[in-house]
Amino acid sequence: MNFITDKMNVEDWDEVASIYREGITTGNATFETNVPEYEAWDNSHHQHCRLVARAGDKVIGWAALSPISQRRVYSGVAELSIYVARSARGCGVGKALLNAIIDESESRGIWILQAGIFPENAASLGLVKACGFREVGRRERIGQMDGVRRDVILMERRSRVVGIEK
C-alpha cells in the first residue's frame, strides 16, 4: 500500500473521526464510547504533533499527542493516540505514523511519550514495543467498560535525544 504521513488539518476531521469510531467499536482501543465533537478533541490535544497517513486523497490513519498535565514540569511528557483504518491495518501505516510522531515530538522538546493500552490489544502493544516503548506498569481495573472493570498496560518511550541530562 502506498501512503505518506502528513500534517493533520481540520479538513481531515471527518475521516479522522470515522477511523476513531472504528477503533471504538473494536472494544479494545479506548474507554471512550463516542467520538467527541472536533472542538472538544482539538482542545484536549496539542496543536502540534497531529499527523495523518494518506493514501491518495484518503486518510487511512492518524496519530496525535495530548498533554498529560497542565503543570509546566510535565510539558515534555505527552499521551499518544494512534488509530489505523480497518482497511489499512497490517500494512505498516501504524509504524510509519508512530515513527513520524516520535520525530515530531522530539523536535518539539517532548522527551517522554506514554500510552495506556488494553492488554487484549496485542497489535498495539507490539507496535509500540517495536518503536522503543517499554512496559512500566499495569493499572488494574482502572476503568469500567460495559459493566466490566478493565486493566490498562502503561507503556512509555523515553527520548534518546531530548531531555537527557549530562
Image: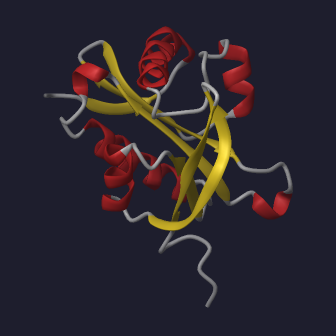
77 vs 121, nearest the viewer: 121
Rendered image coloring scheme: secondary structure
Figure check: 86 above or below 159: above
101 vs 87, nearest the viewer: 87
Figure check: 51 above or below 159: above
Extreme left residue here? 1
Name which quarter of the figure residue 36 lies in.
top right
Residue at horizontal 27%, vertical 31%? 4
Residue 46 in the image: state x and y as whole percent.
Answer: 67, 38
Left/right of residue 88 with respect to residue 1 in the rendered view: right
Residue at horizontal 73%, vertical 20%? 40
Residue 29 in the image: state x and y as whole percent.
Answer: 47, 34
Residue 95 in the image: state x and y as whole percent.
Answer: 30, 46
Name which quarter of the figure residue 139 lies in.
bottom right
Extreme bottom residue here? 166
Where, quadrant-wise, is the N terminus in this rendering? top left
Number of marks drawn: 0
Residue at horizontal 45%, vertical 19%? 25
Left/right of residue 36 with respect to residue 105 in the rendered view: right
Extreme right residue here? 71
Where, quadrant-wise, is the C terminus in this rendering? bottom right
Residue at horizontal 75%, vertical 27%? 43
Residue 46 visible in this rendered orientation of the protein: no
Residue 5 visible in this rendered orientation of the protein: yes
Figure check: 27 above or below 150: above
Figure check: 131 above or below 85: below
